[in-house]
Image (tube, helix red, strand yellow):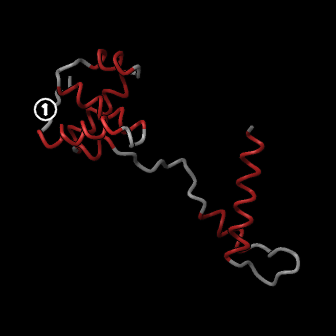
Amino acid sequence: MIEINLKQREKNILKRITAQGKEAARKIKRAQILLLANKKKKTQEIAEILDICPETVSRTKKKYVENGINYAINERERSGAPDGRAEIITLACSKPPEGRAKWTLRLLADKISLDYLMLQYMKH
């Protein structure tokens, strides 16, 4: 069982995050987890209060203990999410549109925006 003992400064930060409601939902949920854990609530109890799985509670508590508050509440870049750089490079190295000698930044941006819009349309 991981015990959470927040410093007053950390409690203030987490309370501000939960009260303002301007942060991402996941960040607010993680702040709530740590505040409840600091009140000595058990993992299962926190999961039930916040309507989340116990693994999320355990993971957040572990991140706090091992790496501190910032690591526990903030999002990390996800390895599976493409950042688009490879697509842009591939496109820039391909044959430019008909009537053009080369790709310009504007042409690349327009093409990528159009492709993105088409993908979104096809999803719905």
**Residue 105: horizontal and vertical position, in percent?**
67, 76
Rendering quarter of residue 73: top left
Residue 113, above or below 92: above
Going by the image, does 67 lie left or right of 90? left
- Image quadrant containing the C terminus: top right
Residue type at mark 1 is: Asn
Disc 1 target residue: 5
Residue situated in front as seen by the camera: 114 or 64: 114
Residue 59, above or below 71: above
Going by the image, does 98 lie left or right of 47? right
Q: Residue at 32% across / 32% down in the picture?
A: 59
Q: Residue at 35% across / 36% down in the picture?
A: 28
Residue 114, above or below 29: below
Q: Residue furthest front?
A: 20
Q: Residue furthest right?
A: 98
- Image quadrant containing the N terminus: top left
**Residue 17: horizontal and vertical position, in percent?**
30, 40
Going by the image, does 74 lie left or right of 85? left
Q: Residue at 74% across / 48% down in the picture?
A: 119
**Residue 102: horizontal and vertical position, in percent?**
76, 82
Going by the image, does 98 lie left or right of 1? right
Rendering quarter of residue 31: top left
**Residue 52: horizontal and vertical position, in percent?**
41, 22
Q: Label 1: state its secondary structure.
A: loop
Q: Residue furthest bottom?
A: 101
Count of numbered circles in the view: 1
Crowd around label 1: few <14 · some 14–19 · many ≥20 (10 Å): some
